[in-house]
Image (cartoon, rainbow, N blue to C red):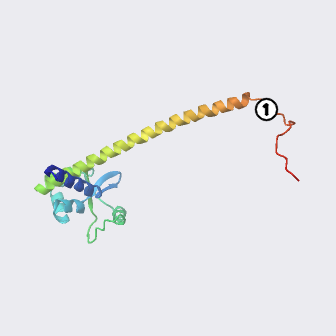
Amino acid sequence: MPKWHSKIGREMSQISKIETMIYVIRGQRVMLDSDLANLYGVETGALNRQVKRNIERFPKDFMFELNQQEFNEIRKSGNSQGGRRSLPRVFTENGVAMLSGVINSDKAIKVNISIMRTFTKMRALLAEDESLVEKLSQFEKGTAKLFQIVFDRLEALERETPSLSPKRKKISLKEDK
């Protein structure tokens, strides 16, 4: 197998792994501090200390702390987060990008590239999904118009067709007695 083929396989595996670490909270796609620390190969506490030292780089739309209910929902989804003393921080795509300037290591740079590619892939999939929804909506409108035309024509035919007299002789099969 060529070297580049194996590298692409590893990167796709990394992207798949990262996709499972992205949650939608408060309408934003975010990653947990502990998942990022794990990917970067540092302790969660060390990552959070670096963030505290550089807090001006992380406005509320880059990073925020989960409330208890949000944290419980993540726990239910299979991410145990056991042993924490405080509620986790989560980072938006911009927050993750900002982390690359705070966590200085070769591994952090490589991981950040994979994370950015994952967010880009997810954005493309969502855009494609929105396009499909729009196409389906247009299709539904078109079929609704088509059915309306068919029903209108059937009603017109019904009005033009002479009514049968109620005194008419009915055709039926006679039963033998």
Q: Position of residue 140 (x, y in %)?
A: 50, 38
Residue sitting nearer the eye, 149 or 65: 149
Residue at coordinates 13% horizontally, 51% vertically from top-left?
Answer: 3
Give the structural element (helix, strand or loop) at label 1: loop
Q: Position of residue 65 (x, y in %)?
A: 28, 59
Q: Residue furthest bottom?
A: 83
Residue corresponding to mark 1: 163
Q: Position of residue 87 (x, y in %)?
A: 28, 65
Q: Seen in the image, is 1 located left or right of residue 141?
A: left
Q: Seen in the image, is 76 located left or right of residue 96?
A: right
Disc 1 marks a residue whose amino acid type is Ser
Residue at coordinates 85% horizontally, 47% vertically from top-left?
Answer: 174
State how many labels appear: 1
Q: Seen in the image, is 20 located left or right of residue 1?
A: right
Q: Position of residue 166 (x, y in %)?
A: 85, 37
Q: Is residue 132 above or below residue 9?
A: above
